[in-house]
Image (cartoon, rainbow, N blue to C red):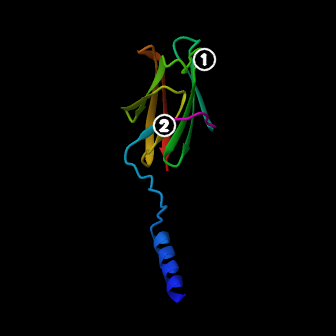
Amino acid sequence: MVKKMVCVFLIGLMLNACHKDIPDPEVKKEISIVPMHTVRAENDVVVLGMKLEHSFTVQHHVKRNNVYVECFIPDISFTNRNTSLIVSVDGKQKKVVTTAAFIIKGLSKGSHQIQLQVVEKNQKQEDMIKDFEVLIR
């Protein structure tokens, strides 16, 4: 009887010891940009290009070392995949996104200059550029 209890205890101990459910830490040195569905933001900036019908509204919100960005451009849709945004951070192009809302992840502490440029049908829209600065603390 004692041998059975010791065996059951050892088997239970081994099964419990084999169970590792520790998540990997999210430590990345590179900046990643992830599309998202909706964003609530504190900052709302409107930029008017040369043409009045092209008002380019960008809202952004900083949370930890991530920047949540949402763009609104009247008469331009991102659903047909003919429109994209070139995202540059500190003067370096990081990614081309095909959604109006996205997250820039992994920014280091300090001030960063972010530029968004609209591309329609593979042509850059020179009057559709938005620059803004974020501070990561």
Task: Indicate the position of residue 62 as horizontal and vertical percent values.
Answer: 54, 43
User: Residue sitting at 44 percent across and 45 percent down?
Assistant: 106
Count of numbered marks: 2
Specify whether residue 128 is in view: no
Residue count near mark 1 (Cα–Cα under 10 Å), binned few <14, some 14–19, many ≥20: few
Specify whether residue 111 is in view: yes
Q: Secondary structure at mark 2?
A: strand
Task: Indicate the position of residue 58 as horizontal and vertical percent values.
Answer: 56, 29
- Answer whether labels 2 and 1 touch (C-beta < 8 Å): no
Task: Indicate the position of residue 8 as horizontal and vertical percent values.
Answer: 52, 78
Quick check: 113 left or right of 68? Answer: left
**Which residues, given as a range, are shown in magenta?**
34-40
User: Residue sitting at 45 percent across and 52 percent down?
Assistant: 26
Q: Amino acid at mark 2?
A: Val
Residue designated by label 2: 34
For residue 122, above or below residue 23: above
For residue 98, above or below residue 66: above
Q: Secondary structure at mark 1?
A: loop
Q: Amino acid at mark 1?
A: Pro
**Closest to the observer: 5 or 87?**
5
Q: Mainly helix, strand or loop, the magenta region?
A: loop
Task: Report if residue 35 lies within the magenta region.
Answer: yes
Instruction: Tell me which corner region of the image, top left, top right, bottom left or bottom right, holds residue 75.
Output: top right
Residue count near mark 2 (Cα–Cα under 10 Å), binned few <14, some 14–19, many ≥20: some
For residue 44, above or below residue 56: below
Residue designated by label 1: 74
